Amino acid sequence: MKTLVLSALMLAFTFGATAQIQAPQPSPLGKLEQKVGLTDVTVEYSRPNMKGRTIFGDLVPFDKMWRTAANKNTMVSFSDDVVIDGQTLKAGTYALFTKPGAANWDVYFYTDTENWGVPQKWDDSKVAAKITVPVVKLPMTIETFTFMVNDLSNGGANLAIIWEDTYVAIPFTVPTDSKVSASINKVMSGPSSDDYYAAAVYYMEEGKDIKKSAEWIDKAVDMTKDKPRFWYHRQQSLIHAKAGNKKEAIAAAKASLAGAKEANNADYIKMNEASLKEWGAM
């Protein structure tokens, strides 16, 4: 009996293992990630091989829309708005379609990414950007379909397609200068109210220099006096109370209470009323 059970288990294991054998895909998935300036560029695509076939003008006909690779649509993502041939392409993910030609390719960034291959019904309104780029013939053949991001600079790069003896490059620019300039301007203009607020709260919670904490929270409140923030005033009251400045703590708690009532924030109303009662101000 034990022998029969053992044999059955061995058979089940053998057939179960066979059913789970994995084999490589003919067009394996690939993923390209590249930082261009401060912008993240990602390409997800399948990678077919030539396998002795003539590709462009045969397997991939000229002047017909192509999925640009194999299997599911090639997906291109940008973390920032980029510019392609004078057209602003919003941050996001796009399906990449092409129309290869002997001398030039038309390249389309398509907003509908849920197609398997070329959409059955093409919709020009979903073309977020289009560019025509020249074909460069290579002195050798490339067996596997390949995307590259090359000719990098701080301000842009080329999204390149290479297969067989063909190379095409799609130039794009990224907003590095505007992002760096904004960062420089922010730093050079000094800490923001949020910076002072965060530093003050951290110092209070970590038991560090409470006088410095009070100085910073007062700056944060002063910087936002045109549009008071009741949560700023709440922390100001707690910091001054901890620093032994009861008068300032009460004034801040009353300001926070008034703002919380205007915002109809029940939690802050309750917390401020409790503090004012504790400090003998209610």
Image (cartoon, helix red, strand yellow):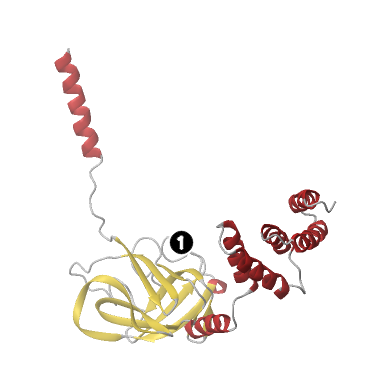
Image x and y of residue 197, in percent: 63, 67
Image x and y of residue 210, in percent: 61, 63
**Which quarter of the picture shows residue 126?**
bottom right
Secondary element type, mark 1: loop
Work out which residue is located at the far right of the displayed protein and give it.
282
Q: Residue at x 48, y 80 (%)?
A: 130
Identify residue type, mark 1: Asn
User: Crowding near pointer 1: few (<14 within 10 Å), some, many (20+)?
Assistant: few
Work out which residue is located at the far top of the displayed protein and give it.
1
- Asked if 21 appears above or below 10 in the picture, the reply is below
**Which quarter of the picture shows residue 6?**
top left
Residue 269 horizontal side relative to residue 40, left or right: right
Q: Residue at x 61, y 68 (%)?
A: 212
Q: Which residue is mark 1?
A: 115
Residue 125 horizontal side relative to residue 143, left or right: right
Q: Nearer the viewer, residue 70 or 210?
A: 210
Q: Which quadrant holds the N terminus?
A: top left
Q: Nearer the viewer, residue 215 or 82?
A: 215
- Asked if 2 appears above or below 231 in the picture, the reply is above
Q: Residue at x 71, y 58 (%)?
A: 241
Work out which residue is located at the far left of the displayed protein and give it.
3
